[in-house]
Image (tube, rainbow, N blue to C red):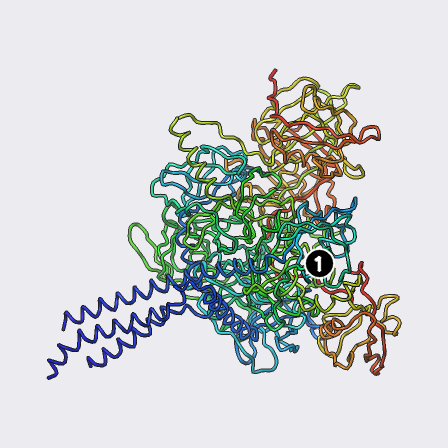
């Protein structure tokens, strides 16, 4: 009987199942096929109501973070502005950005129930820009973590927080958007902090004050902590559709340590990489690092990291950057046509913060008097020299914001024939790399006008009827003076090449600290700094045109905005002085800038008087 | 046991059936994800050589582009190419291939490039009807050059069509309707793809421009029909084997006026004309030394620098009306800007 | 058995595929359906959106900088307004239209054009009321306050060159009762092309009027345009003040005249500065005072006081308690009007 039952029931069950299934599918899918407008609106309203309810639930986990009153917090190293955070545990542990709390010991927190709570700053991750605080009280509603590795472009996200300090009733601002990009790398400060090594890009609008707040997915799970935007200075500090969040999977790597109240460090491998067409090779293994200890060698082709394929340098940076120091990882490399799997205990990346030395927030201002620094007994590294120079002339934040420095007017002394003539130069910048310049020289009582248009390669010199092409030397000379300065400031320390060495030299009885760099063509450049002020006073390099050695003496530093810029350049070719330029006024053009939200919301926004 | 299996299968199928019918209480995002997956392979980045005023040449990601045909045609924004006649296209796999500018539509600010490469993914194009207000758009491009290497995904953003109408923007000469959206565009987004939920091309993202109507930034896309028309022209040009000199983009470099403008820092209410070049448009229109230009095409200016900036936005052939103060009398002087004269070599 | 099992597997696979396809179709259909919903909502609100062209008095086209906001050059295009009553009352934003205008022309959806007379202005909310000589105009449906919830779709309608040509920005309601209870916050793109226009829900009901407010209160919020932070005054508020605006009054925020220290978050609102010639000065409040009670409400933080003041009107008489040198002192003050120059 069982045999017969089986032989009949199978086809029968299949048909039955098939029918039931189709009916179920058609039944549930019916509204989508309906042409009925009210049915469509009804569904939309239903979905909308679901979102409203989800947001209401999630809002209970979002906090507004305020600096503690001066009497409450003896370490006055917290931020001036405020930020946001998200509660991740019933006892009151909450996530936020490191840059929202910095070195403060206590902060005040506002919950969506309208009440204020006190919180202690618990664990810090300056490199990854994450911090844990513990709110007094409880139990609290907390957010569930999601899996940021599963995120896909186009996925819907919600950002919650306190932009512009608008949540005076502590009910968070909610914005929505999609995941715009993944695995983005944003460099941090020069000290090695606030590096967004593998972050999520979103188009949900986030603004100053949103920092530290949660990023939720459609299911209401916490997938990131919002912290940065790319803002265009032409629009002020407001969002322009591009924001970034630290992914939750990175935070999970550090959570156990952060919850014990530690200051954590990120991992570092200790190699320099080079990227080929298809693969990534180790170019150099730095001495004393985890890579060296593990036996990695230059020439090794990196194939896999923790079992995952590595297709680009950025992928390896993404993967290492989110790990804590000391983590043991497996790296598969190819060496001499054989594959080796090497276990590495990753090293520790130093943070830029010095908790022992607490400085109150002051705007970057150049020293009024030269800072007394006795010449170091050993030569400083080129990067240390660059750091001192940048800090002496305005600080990293100011330098990072600079795109172009333009001199508006200047006087110039020029050899015309064998006679020195002085002239007043008026210069207009018209678009990138285009310059129109008009110089009036007075020569033997006659005025000689020189109009030059420089677009990078050619130019005309119009002198009262004569027009001729500029020589390459003249063309390169036009851009000369501030070139050195711009190279040091706008694109990082040694954009003209790699820093080779540092030492000292004596110029006119003064000892200067010198850094040599080599540019792409292998030509050497020398940058000389005054060790008492750390200002750049001399810049020597070969002229690109005819390979003469140009020696610029730079002086007369004046304050322009928050920067110190040079206003006088005396140029020597060999030992012959050929040109003296004095700038009249200088304008600084700022470009695209990575913004860190939460620090000092724009001064113009915010309640003042009531 | 078999009965159990049947029972379980029935349950499973009923559940499956019901799942098929519900997409969750919050908006379904799979449509956005799918549109991005479908269209991204056809979007490229444009790399150009940039030269800051005082810096060396460096390669910069200046914008985005869209692959229109598998025989190598890529459309992008003409103005982002700058003066570089040989831009480089960066594909999704990170490879950089040189491109040629084959033809341009200066009015619509589009340029058609051609690359020599197999295996390109041309984008699917929407049927040709302009989208309606409220329709979802997915914008794919490379704002701020955030996607730098072969494993970085391009950036995607979602919004709706705000309006479909012609726009008046400084430096933009296209008079047909364009697709306005509520997605903020950024440097690097221009030339990117604006697609519908099926991943079909609706338009090409424009440069960031300022609306004359509101004096705030506009966000729009030039309709795909303009790009397809340019593609046809490009094909024609290629078959004729004539290499037409690509029309250089008209913004922001200006047309030629022929007047030396004195730069004053503050205090003046306009730009002074210091000298007029004989036989230039300025000369023919009657501008003279000592004239104070107080407005350009109705826009008030307050310094010589501003006058230069205003002029630089106007291309060859632009009509300009200057409001001029001469001997305490206000005059209006009009002229048309021409191409700059070539220098005479001696 | 093997055959049957294979059959079952194939059928299962087919069902999974079908389910997937149905999900895909349904998802796409759902998203496309939502587009239709947006378009329908805009269409429903459309007839009550008007296009306003402003001719400015010489020199007034440029909005000069003020403490807390940069200067702004107005564009040339028309701006938006909403019909608020059938007998010709139109509300718009005072950023786009105000008494500095020489001539204000209103164009309706049916292309009829009228010159408008300026009535009252609500400075605290950035609104300007206009009157045109027309009757039987289409007033839009309004949304109830209870329907303004965080997370609902927020559709902003602006105008193009013609009123029959609206522009749309979509976002969600980000928060309610912002700016001391004055505004709905949205993340849709707001800018001069839609200031003065309606904030609409997906049923086509007007929830509010978009204006460029800032937390400081003045209408100079144009620097927040297209930033994902935008504001709209709830339509119920507009209707509440309509009688006063119709009578030509200027409504200002209630103003006490004190500056707080926002860092104190317990024990009261700490006074940092008292402005001269204000209600607070007349009441004898001094810097260092801690306000612990206001109009019967206990005050623990300065934020609480902000909201309490926000509920007041100009000329309200308020009773409050301050703590000075450990002693509780009761005081009475008359709320003044917030001067326009104060940021």
In depth, the one of C295 and C201 nearer the eye is C201
Q: Would residue A505 be visible to someone looking at this image? A: yes
Where on the picture, by quarter, is residue C42? Answer: bottom right
Q: Residues within 10 Å of mark 1 (few under 14, many from 20)?
A: many
Left or right: residue A35 versus residue B134 is left
From the top left corner, tell me how far across and down residue A586 is, in percent.
71, 40
From the top left corner, tell me how far across and down residue C34 is, in percent.
48, 61
Q: Which residue is mark 1?
A: C88
The chain holding disc 1 is: C
The C terminus of chain A: image quadrant: bottom right
In depth, the one of B71 and A602 nearer the eye is B71
Where on the picture, by quarter, is residue B22? Answer: bottom left
Determine the residue positioned at 64% across, 74% down: A110
Q: Secondary structure at mark 1?
A: loop
From the top left corner, tell me how far across and down residue A526 is, in percent.
60, 39
The N terminus of chain A: image quadrant: bottom left
Q: Would residue A391 be visible to someone looking at this image? A: no
Residue A446 sits above or below residue A484 on the image: above
Where on the picture, by quarter, is residue B273? Answer: top right
Left or right: residue A217 versus residue A375 is left
């Amino acid at each position: 009987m069982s045999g017969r039952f089986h032989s009949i029931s199978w086809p029968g069950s299949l048909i039955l199942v098939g029918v039931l299934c189709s009916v179920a599918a058609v039944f549930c899918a019916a509204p989508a096929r309906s042409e009925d407008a009210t049915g469509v609106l009804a569904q939309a309203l239903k979905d909308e109501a679901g979102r409203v309810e989800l947001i209401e639930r999630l809002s209970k986990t979002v906090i507004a973070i305020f600096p503690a009153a001066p009497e409450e917090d003896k370490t006055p190293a917290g931020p001036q502005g405020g930020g946001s955070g998200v509660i991740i545990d019933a006892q009151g542990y909450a996530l936020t950005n490191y840059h929202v709390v910095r070195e403060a010991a206590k902060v005040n927190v506002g919950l969506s129930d309208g009440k204020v709570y006190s919180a202690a700053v618990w664990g810090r991750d300056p490199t990854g820009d994450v911090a844990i605080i513990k709110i007094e009280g409880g139990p609290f509603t907390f957010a569930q973590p999601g899996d940021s590795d599963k995120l896909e472009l186009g996925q819907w996200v919600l950002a919650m927080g306190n932009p512009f300090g608008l949540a005076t009733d502590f009910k968070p601002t909610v914005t929505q958007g999609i995941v715009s990009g993944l695995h983005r790398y944003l460099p941090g400060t020069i000290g090695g902090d606030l590096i967004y090594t593998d972050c999520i890009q979103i188009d949900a609008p986030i603004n100053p004050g949103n920092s530290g707040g949660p990023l939720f997915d459609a299911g209401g799970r916490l997938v990131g902590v919002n912290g940065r935007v790319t803002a265009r200075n032409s629009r002020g500090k407001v969002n322009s559709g591009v924001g970034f969040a630290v992914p939750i999977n990175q935070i999970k790597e550090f959570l156990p340590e952060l919850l014990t109240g530690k200051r954590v460090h990120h991992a570092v491998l200790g190699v320099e990489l080079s990227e080929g067409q298809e693969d990534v090779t180790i170019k150099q293994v730095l001495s004393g690092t985890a890579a060296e200890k593990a036996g990695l060698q230059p020439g090794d082709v990196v194939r896999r990291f923790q079992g995952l394929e590595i297709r680009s340098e950025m992928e390896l940076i993404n993967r290492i950057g989110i790990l804590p120091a000391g983590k043991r990882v497996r790296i598969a490399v190819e060496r001499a046509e054989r594959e080796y799997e090497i276990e590495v205990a990753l090293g520790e990346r130093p943070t830029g913060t010095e908790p022992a030395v607490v400085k109150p927030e002051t705007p970057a201002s150049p020293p009024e008097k030269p800072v007394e620094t006795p010449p170091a007994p050993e030569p400083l590294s080129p990067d240390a020299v660059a750091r001192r120079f940048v800090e002496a002339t305005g600080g990293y934040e100011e330098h990072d914001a600079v795109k172009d420095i333009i001199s508006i007017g200047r006087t110039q002394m020029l050899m015309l024939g064998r006679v020195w003539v002085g002239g007043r130069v008026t210069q207009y910048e018209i678009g990138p790399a285009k310059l129109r310049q008009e110089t009036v020289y007075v020569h033997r009582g006659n005025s000689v006008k020189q109009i030059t248009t420089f677009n990078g390669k050619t130019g005309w010199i119009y002198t009262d009827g004569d027009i001729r092409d500029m020589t390459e030397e003249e063309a390169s000379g036009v851009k000369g003076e501030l070139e050195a300065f711009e190279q040091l400031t706008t694109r990082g320390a040694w954009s003209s090449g790699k820093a080779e060495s540092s030492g000292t030299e004596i110029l006119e009885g003064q000892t200067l600290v010198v850094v040599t760099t080599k540019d792409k063509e292998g030509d050497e450049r020398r940058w000389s700094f005054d060790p008492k002020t750390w200002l750049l006073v001399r810049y020597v390099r070969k002229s690109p045109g005819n390979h003469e050695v140009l020696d610029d003496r730079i002086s007369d530093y004046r304050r322009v905005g928050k920067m110190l810029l040079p206003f006088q350049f005396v140029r020597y070719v060999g030992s012959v002085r050929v040109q003296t330029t004095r700038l009249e006024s200088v304008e600084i053009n700022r470009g695209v800038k990575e913004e860190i939200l939460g620090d000092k919301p724009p001064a113009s926004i915010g309640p003042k008087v009531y | 046991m078999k009965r159990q299996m049947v029972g379980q299968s029935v349950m499973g199928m009923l559940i499956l059936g019901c799942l098929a019918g519900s997409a969750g209480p919050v908006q379904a995002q799979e449509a956005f994800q799918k549109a991005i997956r479908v269209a991204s392979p056809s979007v490229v980045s444009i790399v150009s050589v940039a030269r800051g005023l005082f810096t060396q040449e460096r390669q910069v990601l200046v914008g985005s582009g869209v692959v229109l045909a598998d025989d190598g045609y890529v459309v992008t924004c003409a103005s982002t190419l700058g003066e570089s006649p040989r831009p480089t296209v960066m594909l999704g796999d990170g490879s950089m291939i040189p491109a040629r500018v084959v033809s341009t539509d200066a009015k619509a600010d589009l340029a058609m490039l051609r690359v020599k490469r197999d295996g390109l993914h041309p984008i699917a194009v929407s049927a040709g009807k302009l989208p309606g207000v409220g329709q979802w758009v997915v914008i794919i491009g490379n704002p701020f050059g955030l996607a730098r290497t072969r494993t970085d995904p391009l950036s995607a953003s979602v919004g709706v069509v705000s309006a479909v109408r012609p726009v008046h923007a400084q430096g933009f000469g296209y008079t047909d309707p364009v697709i306005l959206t509520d997605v903020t565009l950024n440097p690097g987004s221009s030339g990117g793809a604006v697609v519908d939920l099926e991943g079909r091309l609706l338009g090409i993202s424009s440069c960031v421009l300022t609306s004359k109507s509101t004096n705030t930034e506009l966000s729009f896309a030039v309709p795909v029909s303009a790009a397809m028309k340019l593609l046809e022209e490009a094909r024609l040009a290629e078959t004729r084997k004539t290499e037409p000199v690509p029309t250089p983009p008209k913004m922001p470099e200006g047309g030629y006026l022929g007047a030396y403008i004195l730069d004053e820092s503050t205090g003046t209410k306009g730009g002074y004309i210091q000298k007029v070049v004989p036989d230039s448009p300025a000369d023919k229109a009657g501008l003279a030394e000592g004239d104070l230009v107080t407005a350009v095409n109705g826009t008030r200016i307050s310094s010589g620098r501003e006058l230069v900036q205003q002029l630089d936005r106007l291309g060859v052939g632009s009509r300009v009306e200057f409001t001029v103060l001469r001997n305490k009398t206000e005059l209006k002087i009009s002229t048309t800007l021409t191409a700059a004269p070539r220098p005479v070599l001696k | 058995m093997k055959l049957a099992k294979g059959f079952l597997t194939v059928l299962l696979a087919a069902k999974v595929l079908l389910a997937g396809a149905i999900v895909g179709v349904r998802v796409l259909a759902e998203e496309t359906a939502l587009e239709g919903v947006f378009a329908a909502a805009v269409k429903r609100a459309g007839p009550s959106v008007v296009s306003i062209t402003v001719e400015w008095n010489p020199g007034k086209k440029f909005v000069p900088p003020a403490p807390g906001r940069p200067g702004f050059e107005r564009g040339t295009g028309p701006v938006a307004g909403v019909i608020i009553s059938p007998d010709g009352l139109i509300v718009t934003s005072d950023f786009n239209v105000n008494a500095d205008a020489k001539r204000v022309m209103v164009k309706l959806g049916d292309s009829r054009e009228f010159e408008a007379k300026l009535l009252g202005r609500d400075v605290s909310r950035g609104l300007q009321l206009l009157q045109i000589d027309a009757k039987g105009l289409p007033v839009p449906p309004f949304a109830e306050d209870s329907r303004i919830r965080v997370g609902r779709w927020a559709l902003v309608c602006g105008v193009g060159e013609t009123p029959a040509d609206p522009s749309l920005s979509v976002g969600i309601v980000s928060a309610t009762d912002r700016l001391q209870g004055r505004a709905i916050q949205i993340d849709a793109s707001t800018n001069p092309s839609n200031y003065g226009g309606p904030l609409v829900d997906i049923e086509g009901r007007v929830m509010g009027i978009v204006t460029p407010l800032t937390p400081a209160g003045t209408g100079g919020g144009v620097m927040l345009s297209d930033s994902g932070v935008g504001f709209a005054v709830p339509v119920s508020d507009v209707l509440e003040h309509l009688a006063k605006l119709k009578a030509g009054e200027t409504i200002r925020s209630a103003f006490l005249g004190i500056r707080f220290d926002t860092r104190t978050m317990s024990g009261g609102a700490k006074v940092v500065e008292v402005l001269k010639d204000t209600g607070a000065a007349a009441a004898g409040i001094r810097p260092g005072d801690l306000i612990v009670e206001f109009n019967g409400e206990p005050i623990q933080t300065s934020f609480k006081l902000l909201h309490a003041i926000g509920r007041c009107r100009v000329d309200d008489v308020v009773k409050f308690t301050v703590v000075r040198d450990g002693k509780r002192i009761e005081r009475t003050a008359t709320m003044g009007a917030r001067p326009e120059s104060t940021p």
